[in-house]
Image: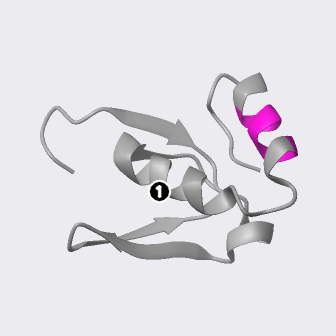
Amino acid sequence: MEHGEETIRLILPRESYGPCVEGALNGVNFRIPTGVPVEVPLRIYRVLEESRRGDPAYAEWMNGFTATGGQKLS
């Protein structure tokens, strides 16, 4: 994470993602644990959000996320 980069606090549901979420963004690898509160760079959150758009439960997921003030992804 770059110094001063904006972050967001969230909880990724273990039921949807398994024990962790792994990926790469612009050549930087990341591994995010699920089921616990974490802070991630906003750019990684946007990738996660975009990946969920094809999910039939996306609208319900987004409603849960916005209802908690952006604190939970479920």
Q: Please name the residue shown 75% across and 39% down the image.
A: 62
Q: Please name the residue shown 48% across and 48% down the image.
A: 45
Magenta span dominant secondary structure: helix
Q: Is residue 35 visible?
A: no
Vertical side of 59 occupied by 18: above or below: below
Under mark 1, the amino acid is Val
Q: Is residue 3 visible?
A: yes
Give the magenta range: 60-65
Vertical side of 64 occupied by 48: above or below: below
Query: 20 left or right of 62?
Result: left
State yes or no: residue 15 in magenta. no
Which residue is under mark 1?
Answer: 47
- Residue 36 in the image: x percent, y percent? 61, 54
Q: Quadrant of residue 17?
A: bottom right
State yes or no: residue 64 in magenta. yes
Vertical side of 73 occupied by 54: above or below: below
- Viewer-closest of 61 and 1: 61
- For this orientation, the residue located farthest to the left is 3
Vertical side of 49 occupied by 14: above or below: below
- Residue 66 in the image: x percent, y percent? 71, 27
Q: Please name the residue shown 41% across and 75% down the image.
A: 23
Q: Circle 1 — which element?
A: helix
Q: How is the image coloured?
A: one colour
